[in-house]
Amino acid sequence: MNPRAYWRFVVVIWQFFPLLWAYARDRRRFLVFGASRTVTSDQRRKRAAKLLDSLLTLGPTFIKLGQLLSTRPDILPPEYIAEFSKLQDDVPPADWAGARQVIEEELGPIDRRFESFDEDPISGASLGQVYVAHIDGQKVAVKVRRPGVESLVEADLRVIRWLLPLLMRFVDEARSFSLETLADEFAKTIRQEMDYRRESRMLREIRANFADDDDIRMPAVVDSHSTGRVLTMEYVGGTKITELEGIDRLGLDRSGLAERLQRTYLKMIITDGVFHADPHPGNLAVADDGTLVFYDFGMSGYVDPFVQDRIVEFYSAIARQDIDEILDALVEMGTLSPEADREVMADVMELAIADARGQDIEQYRVQQIVQQVEDTMYEFPLRLPSNLALVLRVATVVEGVCVTLDPDFDFINVATSYLGEEGYIEEGAREYVRQRGQELRDAADSTLRIPPKLESALDQIERDSVTVDAEISDPQDHFETLGRRIVLGLVFASGIVSTTILAVFSIPEVAAIVGGLTLLVGAFLYRSFRAKRGISAQPKFTRHRMREREREAEKEEQAALGFGDIDAFGVGGVAAEEGPPGGDSDGRGSSDAGGPSDTDGGTTNTTSIDVTDGSDDPDEQSGDGR
């Protein structure tokens, strides 16, 4: 039994209770009865800001959780994603006495192990902090785990597990799946981040894969001064990858840097099967000679061969713009439900590809697709299995950094080019031919096996020895709803008749009671027809919306200056959204304190649909996006 976990549970409930109360009232205005409440985008934004404050108050574990949530549009609405992207992993550093105690417990007296040691950290994050020191004349970065953070994290992980069943009551089935996945992923990830021995192994393995690439730089580990709680590496300086002015002063090609970064991660994920999973701008830098520098390998992972093959199929299908193959790859990876409406999903994918290529999308086309989604699906059938969560996170954040470097960056072209150069597309074509050949052989075998079986089946039918058992599938409980309405209708009708008879025979007291009960039954019957569940979908095609926001801003600015609607003549552009500085730094002079998805001036290019559980009546929508 962990008393600290019980106390943390009370503290967490105290912080989250106002929001949980509000969410409960959104579903039922008076908690146990009443219609759902309409929640506006502005209200969701205010709630997200309050939740952000609670996460900051609760400390390191919940800051990390918020950063992870900021990369999960399958769980949170866009207002929460935008707010959580501001999360800074920049907390006041632990006092030097505590850090010194950790170092000396792991390595021995500092004066004996280091020539010099700067007691002021160059970065302070939630789980560790980084100092600069010298060993045998070599400048090194020393990453030290924050004192006492292990017990706090374990207590918080237990609290999150206790809270999970409660949170499930506020979300639908698809998001319940994603929440469970998130909880497992988060517990595994944060424990791995605290294990500096694992980080050292991952760093060495990934660094070895790029040993022959002079354009990539990763710090070497100083094994003699590294343990499970202290990691010492060579100090590698550089310009933060989103400091565009600094990169321009170096005379470097930003488009080339973006392409090299994308290719590096494609190599890690598709070719090597081991990858650096925290590519936010604070962990990426550019040396003066244009070399890409990678920091902080605490969050890293492996890709199993099955997922690698599916990713290759997915990118190859995108390159060919073969929508059916794209959907097949998504189903095989587990990100798309096999029961999804393929026609609707095909239209959604067409828009997603167009947006990813930076193409303009006609608004009427967007609305047409959204209407199809609303008419045919109860929930948007995209899910995120745990083995793909980190891969998707990397793809999303890397593309955001690339778009910051080059607003016209086309990741599809880069991915297609890489797959072609590495022979994956050619191998895919050969595999396609082999599969079709096998299907032809199977079809030939079937032509020999089917006739005897068909003759036997026809003989049984002719002898009347065939019975058919039919089972009706009703996952949405339509028959139960119909039966309930029939019962309520019969009770309501009999109540009207009974009330009328009692009134005619001058028994007003009993007639009033029966009439009141009849009205109550009628209200339930009316509500059963009114409370139809559906979805309310909002398109968020990032570059398309980015251009719209830019045009709207220019119109407002010109109107304020009295120039009228300049945009009618085609004046418009693409503006990058300013983000906060972000994250851990390992061996750097400046630190980035943003969340994992912070692109620090860039815009992460994602395409998604925000699905909320609502009703046919706009006044009854439950629109908090959960």
Image (cartoon, grey):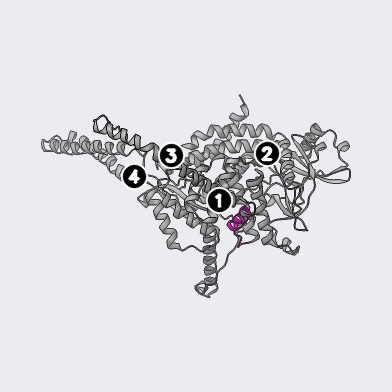
**In front: label 4 or label 1:** 1
Residue 557 position in % (x across, y down): 55, 69
Question: Which amino acid lies under the numbered mark 4 shown in the image of this protein?
Answer: Ala
Q: On the image, numbered disc 4 is attached to which residue?
A: 531
Cα distance between the residues tagged 2 and 3: 54 Å
User: Mark 4: few, some, or many residues within 10 Å (few <14, many ≥20)?
Assistant: some
Residue 21 painted magenta: no
Cα distance between the residues tagged 1 and 3: 25 Å
Label annotation for residue 445 = 3
Cα distance between the residues tagged 2 and 1: 40 Å
**In front: label 2 or label 1:** 1
| Image quadrant assignment for residue 12 | top right
Question: Which amino acid lies under the numbered mark 2 shown in the image of this protein?
Answer: Glu
Q: On the image, numbered disc 1 is attached to which residue?
A: 429
Label annotation for residue 193 = 2
Nearer to the camera, 409 or 613: 409
Q: Magenta span covers which residues? A: 407-419
- Dot placed on the residue nearer the N-terminal end, 2 or 1: 2
